[in-house]
Every structure is written in structure tokens, then in C-alpha cells.
Image: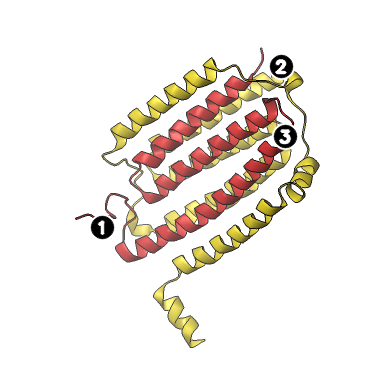
Amino acid sequence: MSVGIDNFLIVGAILFCIGLFVALSKRNAIGVLMGVELMLNAVNLTLLTFSRFGAGQHAIAGQTFVTFVITVAAAEASVALALTVSVYRNRDTVDVDRINLLKS
Amino acid sequence: MDGVAVTLSFWILAAVTLVAAAGVVLARNLLHAVLLLILSFVGIAGFFLLLSAEFLAMAQVIIYVGAVAVLVLFAILLTPHAGRDNGETRMAAPALLLSLCLLAVLCFVIQDTAWPLATGGGPGLSAADLGEALLTTWVLPFEVASVLLTAALVGAIMLARTPQDEAEDALA
């Protein structure tokens, strides 16, 4: 019984695909954001897997990259949720298929 | 990685994380979806521990489980008339098809590639190593990240302000 690199990578791949489906299909803008967060987490898991298992001189680079991804994800979440609240205030909805002012 | 404990924790974490992520898709109430998302984040933090990235596991718990989840909950509670429905748009079927195709391709690639693996599972890295790398090799991206966070902070406050807030600031 042992856990190899492919087990971790497949968990990351499944998580990414769930996140992709959530981001593409949810009607609520906050739901879309949750999908994006899931995808970012899946990518972080994959990066750390390669950092742990991969052969190379720069294993610390994987952990550094994950640090920056977490930072940028936090910034993205704060701005995106502020945008959601701002859209709600002007249009009284956060449904992405009803935010269609530019549609002719 | 060998050992019964590691294998057992991997499968438990995988089950918890993936079931919680699937719950985000299936939950009908948006608040339930957020709570399941938090559970999924905790599972990811467990994976980080299993991959011997202790600092990042702690950062994951503080930033995602603590900050991002609270932000998402705030956003839901600040949009009361928008409804709590976690339904899909008309694009659900194409999105499902695309996700499944991507999953199939990724699984094929993962199984079919001979990964150049480190002998002995790679080196163990500590938080001290990460801190040293951040402040020597990657010091410029580190500083740029702080500028990005400041810009995001200011931008979020500007976007979330109401016209009443702006009028009060003009008087003050």
C-alpha cells in the first residue's frame, strides 16, 4: 500500500474539473467565484505535489509559487466580491445571466 | 510514500475533499454550498500537511478557511434580495461536457507520463527554507505581492462604497 504522485495529481485534476464546472455553470456570481477558488486550490495541490515528488534542484520553488498563488487569490476574492456587492447595489441581482446590459 | 498511516490519511482526505467539492455543485442552498467549500479547503490543507508543507497548510487554513470563506459569506449576506438559490444557467450541459472531457484528458496524461521522480520522495522542506527563499531569490515578487495586496485593498473599498459614503466623506 503506497500513495504515489499520480494519486495526488488525479485528486487535483478531479478538483479542478469540479471547480471548472461550478465556475461555468452557476447562475449566482458568488457561486462562480466559489468555482474559481476551487480551481486555484486544485492548482496549488498539483504544484505542491510536483514540489514534493519531482526530481530537481528547485523544490522550494513550488512552495514559493503556491505562496504567491494564495496571495493573488486572496486579492482576487476581495475585489471580485466587492464588484458583486457593487453590481447588486445597482441592479438588485447577482445572477450572471441577468447582468446583460450590453446585450443588444 | 509508503506506510499505512499515510495511505489511510490520503484516501480519507481525498474522500472528504472531493465529496465536499461535489456538494458545492449539488447543494441547492448557496449558504450550504459555502460551508461545503470550507470543508473542501480544510481537506486541501490536510493534503498540504501530507506533502510536508506545514507552513502552507497553516496559511491555507488562515487565508482560505478564515478570510476568503468569511468574505464569501459576507457577500452572500450583503446581497439579501438576490436569493440563496445555487442553480445552474442554461450552459450547465455544455459546461459538464467540457469538464468531463478535460478530466478525461488530464487523467490520460497523468497515467501515461513517466514522471521524473526524485529518489526517496524528494527533500523535506521547512518553513525556514521557504522564508529564506522568499527573502533572497524571490524578494522582488514578494514585494510586488505586497503592492498588489494594497491595490486590492484600496480597490475593494472603492468598489464597495455607496454614494452616501462618498457624500459623508465630502462633508468631512
In the picture of the structure, the residue carrying the numbered disc 1 is: A102
Q: Position of residue B50 (x, y in %)?
A: 68, 29
Looking at the picture, tell me which residue is in the foreground, B145 or B94.
B145
Judge whether A95 appears above or below B78 on screen.
Answer: above
Left or right of residue B20: residue B148:
right
Residue A58: mark: 3
Looking at the picture, tell me which residue is in the foreground, A6 or B80.
A6
What residue sits 77% from the left and 30% below the top? Answer: B124
What residue sits 41% from the left and 45% below the top? Answer: A31
In the picture of the structure, the residue carrying the numbered disc 2 is: B2
Looking at the picture, tell me which residue is in the foreground, A84 or A101.
A101
Is the residue marked by circle 1 packed among few (<14), some (14-19), or many (20+) residues within 10 Å? few
Look at label 1 and name its amino acid.
Leu
Chain B appears in which tint? yellow
Q: Are marks 2 and 1 on the same chain?
A: no
Look at label 2 and name its amino acid.
Asp
